Amino acid sequence: VRSNNPLLLKNFGTESVWSYEAGIRSEFLDRRATANLTVFFGDTSNLQIATAVANPGGAPVFPVGNFSDFESSGAELETNFLVTDGLTVFANAGYNKTEYMNPTAEVLTQQAACVASIAAGATARPNCAAGIIRADGGIARPLRAPEFTGTLGFSWEKPVSNDYQVVLSGSGRFVSKFNVNSAELATTRDPGYSLVSGSFAFERQDGKLQFSVTEPLTE
């Protein structure tokens, strides 16, 4: 819920992003296999972040503000292999390193006040666990940015007539732990997850018509 209290609303600057990518695309084994590698770097200025703040009535709201710049860098690998006619297996992996950079003067002042309250043993620490400052006074890790991801799966196509085919596919996906709160509260740290799913489809071979059922096999 966005704030309807003008006292909690602040002006924020325009966010700008410079992103760079480089990669290699390859085919081998008579084009039965492909391997694509991409590396990337993103540099964001005046990152806009919605942080949780309590309204005077107690309900949380999420006003937007500029707290720092942001950098993201990593790599993605995508591979496919045609095992036999109709059967393809694939594996993808990703690495993403993210970090808040150049915190604003307001954030640095808040961080200093948080660290001072911890050092003094204060019970009330309003400057801690707020904005992008963790409860221990450090800068939080960026939101919803798992460091590692991976997918492994297959797709099997079997013609049943000159025009139609059935397709059976399955995949497993892994996502490492990530932060879902701007201040990286311990109670809001997502431990990551694994997901296995399968699907069955009946379709025209020209792709103009398809009926499919997809079912997650894990929660």
Image (cartoon, grey):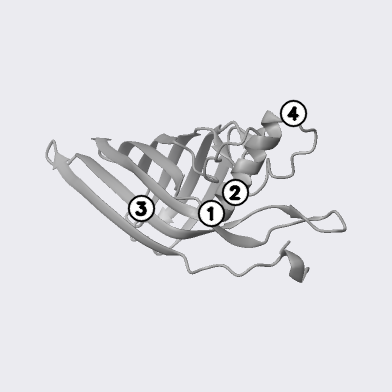
* Residue 4 % position (x, y): 77, 69
Say which residue label 3 marks. 42
Q: Residue 21 carries which label?
A: none
Disc 3 and disc 4 in contact, CB within 8 angstroms: no
* N-terminal-most mark, 3 or 4: 3
Disc 1 and disc 2 in contact, CB within 8 angstroms: yes
Residue 200 seen from this side: yes
Residue type, numbered disc 1? Ala
Say which residue label 2 marks. 109
User: Is 80 left or right of 7, judged from the image as shown?
Assistant: left
Say which residue label 4 marks. 121
* N-terminal-most mark, 4 or 1: 1
Residue type, numbered disc 2? Thr
Residue 187 seen from this side: no
* Residue 206 % position (x, y): 33, 61
* N-terminal-most mark, 2 or 3: 3
Q: Provide the secondary structure element on which disc 4 rests.
A: loop
**Distance (Cα) linking label 2 and label 4:** 19 Å
Q: Provide the secondary structure element on which disc 1 rests.
A: helix
Viewer-nearest of discs 1 and 3: 1
Decide: is 19 above or below 109. below
Quadrant occupied by the C terminus? top right
Say which residue label 1 marks. 105
**Distance (Cα) linking label 3 and label 4:** 39 Å
**Distance (Cα) linking label 1 and label 3:** 23 Å
Q: Provide the secondary structure element on which disc 3 rests.
A: strand
* N-terminal-most mark, 2 or 4: 2
Task: State the residue at coordinates (55%, 40%).
Answer: 139
Residue type, numbered disc 3? Gly
Viewer-nearest of discs 3 and 4: 4
Q: Label 2 crowding class (10 Å Cα cut-off): few <14, some 14-19, many 20+? A: few
**Distance (Cα) linking label 2 and label 3:** 27 Å
